[in-house]
Amino acid sequence: MLEIGTKAPEFTLPDQNGEPHSLSDYRGEKVILYFYPRDNTPGCSKQACAFGELYPQFREKGAVVLGVSKDSVASHKKFEEKYGLPFTLLSDVEKEVIRAYDVWKEKKNYGKVSMGVVRTTYLIDENGVIVKAFDKVKAADNPTQMLGALE
């Protein structure tokens, strides 16, 4: 996990519509950058829907929400449409940003060891500095936790 107080790594990734988004596009706004394992899985769907429900409150506090996974643009589009998500989903198929943000880790599931995205959320301030970082977050609780982190 990246250290609080460090500059967030710059990136450019395509969203669910294939449009490029760079972290620098959001200078002057707070960014909730959350990394999740996969579209349309129970935990990831709960997390995305909760971020969606709270999205107006995030906007009121001057924050945008960006979700990142290694799923394709097409997968993100289906995920967005299925749940009516009002925020941007970024596709990192090459895992460059996932690695830059140190969320590609060894995971154990039922005794099986594999590499994957560890559910992690960063709060990045208006100047592109990481001000809060949460790893191994609980999917359903993370959006409320992040809303509180904006206080």
Image (cartoon, rainbow, N blue to C red):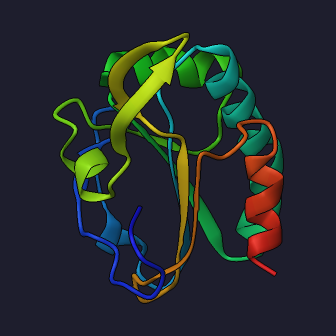
Q: Is residue 71 above or below residue 18?
A: above
Q: For this rendering, which residue is in front, 130 or 106?
A: 106
Asked where in the image residue 10 lies, by quadrant, the reply is bottom left
Identify the residue at image location x=34%, y=20%. Answer: 114
Q: For this rendering, which residue is in front, 70 or 62?
A: 70
Q: Position of residue 30 (x, y in %)?
A: 57, 76
Asked where in the image residue 82 lies, by quadrant, the reply is top right
Does any portion of residue 18 appear in the rendered image?
A: yes
Locate residue 104 relative to residue 81 in the image: left or right.
Answer: left
Locate residue 45 relative to residue 37 in the image: left or right.
Answer: right
Q: Quadrant of the N terminus?
A: bottom left
Identify the residue at image location x=52%, y=83%. Answer: 125
Number of numbered tags placed on the structure image: 0
Identify the residue at image location x=41%, y=81%. Answer: 27
Locate residue 131 relative to residue 91 in the image: left or right.
Answer: right
Q: Position of residue 92 (x, y in %)?
A: 27, 37
Q: Quadrant of the C terminus?
A: bottom right
Does any portion of residue 16 appear in the rendered image?
A: no
Identify the residue at image location x=53%, y=50%. Answer: 120
Q: For this rendering, which residue is in front, 24 or 148?
A: 148
Q: Is residue 3 above or below residue 73?
A: below
Q: For this rendering, which residue is in front, 77 or 67?
A: 67
Q: Residue furthest front?
A: 111
